[in-house]
Image: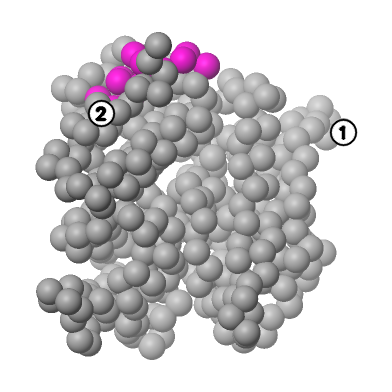
Amino acid sequence: MATLKKNYLIKKRNVLNEIRANGMTLQELRFFSIYLSKINAKDSSTRVVRFSLDDFQAIMELDSRIKIDYMKKVTDSLLCKIVHVPTKSGGYNAFQLFKKCRVDTDENGEWYVEIDAHDEALPLMFDYQARFFSYQLWNALRLKSSNQLRMYEILKQYEKIGSRVLGVEELKELLGIGKNEYPRFGDFKTYVLTACQQALQESTDIKFAYEPCGKKGKGGKIIYLKFIIEKNADYVDQMTLFEFIEERKKDIIDVQVDWDEITEDADNTEIPTAYREKIEFLAEACNNEFSFNEVVVLFNEMRCKLPPSLIQDDIQCYDYLMDKYREMLMRNDRTKIKHRFGYLKSIIGKDYEP
């Protein structure tokens, strides 16, 4: 599609950007960015966006051989994303971002995916005159986790001001991180702040520094962070949506997945892209706390102990691992776990033991 060669501009209302991520995966966040880049914010008649099925599968990083039943799970997940918009009185309005999805063939017999925004969500996406920010889509295409993409948007909104002060708990909420995740600031710093700082400097048009700000809590607990936001000229080359899609299509065509070839000794640099991205997708279920090889071990444990029907479904695998990770965090909040990776591995499959 020739129109994919342009470098789309995303316009996003501040109020939409300040809504909790609500468990959206990297692929879903990236798809939403692409959707916003393809509509005209001044014309709500552009609310319906159509992708060829091949393009949609590439954007969502899906195997091109998937069947309609699997597509239903992917599109249902998009249709289930609910936002909670605060009211002035302290309440909220809740509704879905998208109301309808159509997967069908056109007059030429070509498969397509068409998605329409929810009526209640239209004021968040169209016909606004102020309190919005914009960025070029290429900034979202090379980021490797939902935390990284959300951190980019959270800080990009304040780029013109040059700084932003956020409470640690407020930041976690904006990133979509659960209340029991990363209870120790050191872990949050390592696995979220530092990882995002490196990713944004490598792949986007902004970079940031941060420092504790304001009074500290009991026991010297850091409560607020001040972010210094600057333009970044040292990023890798910009990537168009067309290039992004074509790159992923090539990965899907060139690689036949055989998980038996991947072990805990796997060298990340030698593994085909499709293998690597599968593991990186599952790593997000654990908020990228564990290394690539550790996630390989976790997945192999799942393969040994869980039903094949679950293992063959990427979304079910992701949801299962995320549930076990959150179970570990809740246990850790009550009784400190010394070896978090080992504990997580030990509880995988216990709910399926005879």
Q: State the image coordinates of residue 318 (x, y, percent, origin top left).
A: 44, 35
| Closest to the observer, 271 or 6 | 271
Q: State the image coordinates of residue 59 (x, y, percent, origin top left).
A: 54, 42
Queried whether the magenta region covers residue 305, the answer comes back as yes
- Which of the 4 quarters of the picture holds residue 10? bottom right
Badge 2 crowding class, 10 Å Cα cut-off, few under 14, some 14 to 19, many 20 or more, is many
What residue lies at 26% left-to-right and 34% top-to-bottom?
A: 344
Relative to 350, residue 39 above or below: below
Q: Is residue 195 left or right of residue 111?
A: left
**Residue 345, which numbered label?**
2
Range covered by the magenta-colored residues: 297-309
Q: Is residue 128 left or right of residue 43?
A: left
Badge 1 crowding class, 10 Å Cα cut-off, few under 14, some 14 to 19, many 20 or more, is few
What residue lies at 41% left-to-right and 81% top-to-bottom?
A: 158
Tell me the CA gap for discs 2 and 1: 50 Å
| Closest to the observer, 241 or 36 | 36
| Closest to the observer, 206 or 22 | 22
**Residue 65, which numbered label?**
none
Q: Is residue 1 left or right of residue 225?
A: right
Queried whether the magenta region covers residue 250, the answer comes back as no
Relative to 63, residue 196 above or below: below
Q: State the image coordinates of residue 104 (x, y, percent, origin top left).
A: 79, 33
